[in-house]
Image (cartoon, rainbow, N blue to C red):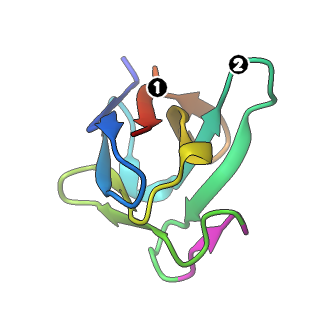
Amino acid sequence: QVQLVESGGGLVQPGGSLRLSCAASGFTFSTYSMYWFRQTPGKEREFVALIPTDGGITNYADSVKGRFTISRDDVKATVYLQMNSLKPEDTAVYYCRATRLWTYWGQGTQVTVSS
């Protein structure tokens, strides 16, 4: 059974930080490119960050570049999203995605940035 389980979301103040985790199981994690997406009500799910199978060349949405860092640990089969300098507009449900031939999605974790 393929599973992607996000954790680490919550409520933080503007300028604060959160570290999201996505624990994978049921597939060969190291062969999958890993992504973070986010979605707010009424809006299309948007790309946030990508880390490829070798973990070497990451990619970020312009809106988060310089503030967010994606990383992966293939031994732990976990991908992370370190989010710094958070803004209210970062408020969303954050989803983990694994892609090779097929794509798998996690259930999402809520991040709320508010005073």
Disc 2 marks a residue whose amino acid type is Pro
Q: Is 92 one of the magenta-colored residues?
A: no
Dividing the picture into quadrants, the one containing residue 69 is: bottom left
The residue that appears at 46% across and 75% down in the rendered structure is: 54
The residue that appears at 33% across and 46% down in the rendered structure is: 20
Disc 1 marks a residue whose amino acid type is Gly
Front label number (2 vs 1) = 2
Q: Judging from the image, what secondary structure is the residue with disc 1 in? A: loop
Q: Quadrant of the C terminus?
A: top left
**Residue 80, position as x, y percentages in the image:** 34, 55
Q: Can residue 14 be seen in this view?
A: yes
In the displayed structure, 7 sits above or below 36; it is above
**Residue 74, position as x, y percentages in the image:** 28, 60
Dominant secondary structure, magenta: loop
Q: Is residue 52 left or right of residue 18?
A: right
Q: Quadrant of the N terminus?
A: top left
**Residue 111, position as x, y percentages in the image:** 43, 35
The residue to which callout 2 is attached is 41
Residue furthest to the front: 115
The residue to which callout 1 is attached is 108
Q: Give the range drawn in magenta.
A: 57-62
Label 1 crowd (10 A; few <14 / some 14-19 / many >=20): many
Q: Earlier in the sequence, mark 2 or mark 1?
A: 2
Q: In this view, does 63 lie to the left or right of 84?
A: right
Dividing the picture into quadrants, the one containing residue 103 is: top right
Q: Can residue 99 be seen in this view?
A: no
Q: Judging from the image, what secondary structure is the residue with disc 2 in? A: loop
Residue furthest to the bottom: 56
